[in-house]
Amino acid sequence: MKLVALLGALAVAGCSGLKIYSSDAPKNVRIASHLEGARAVLHVHEVTGPCATRYEGTVKLDQPAVDLGVPAGRSSFLVVGFDTSSILGGQRGTTVGTVVTPRDGYRYELGVRYKDNLYDVGLREIDRKGTSRDLPRGGVGGC
């Protein structure tokens, strides 16, 4: 329940006053964004237990590609927040989240797309040889 309340608060708050995500971890996640008619951000949370996370910061997805480091060997909850606004439709927002536990030496690609009121978020893991696989989206367990 706490997680749902947190995500709702983040969606309502938008980007104002949110902490910018930074990490000393090697840059192992590339976020590729293709956004038409929306703004997007990525909220990064450390998974601290069943149905529990700790907010670490937010990254604006205002460039076609953004690289960041997510610590390997520990679970992180990555939440993409989409925000749209129009004269007739007002302002709307939605979030899509997934848990990932990066493996040391692997790279990850998070594809973030929005067009014609449709969004898509996909996560791919790439090993040292360049072989990749799609990872299923999953929430924080125990909720």
Image: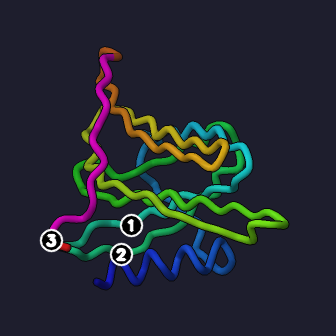
Q: Position of residue 80 (x, y in %)?
A: 50, 57
Q: Disc 2, disc 3: CB below 8 Å?
A: no
Tell which of 68 and 10 is nearer to you.
10
Badge nearest the viewer, 2 or 3: 3
The residue under the point 53% across, 64% down is: 94
Left or right of residue 45, residue 12 in this image: right
Residue holding disc 3: 142
Question: Mark 2–mark 1 contact, CB under 8 Å?
Answer: yes
Q: Quadrant of the N terminus?
A: bottom left
Q: Which residue is mark 2?
A: 54
In-image side of 79 versus 100 (left or right): right
- Which of the marked residues, 2 or 1, is nearer the chain's N terminus? 1
Mark 1 neighbour class, 10 Å CA radius: few under 14, some 14 to 19, many 20 or more:
many
- Where does the magenta region start and end? 131-142
For residue 134: magenta?
A: yes
119 or 9, which lies in front? 119
**Is residue 19 one of those drawn in magenta?**
no
Q: CA distance from mark 2 to mark 1?
A: 5 Å
Residue 80 higher or lower than 93, as above or below: above
SS of the residue at dot 3? loop
Q: Percent from the top left, x then y, of residue 140?
A: 24, 65
Q: Which mark is residue 61?
A: none
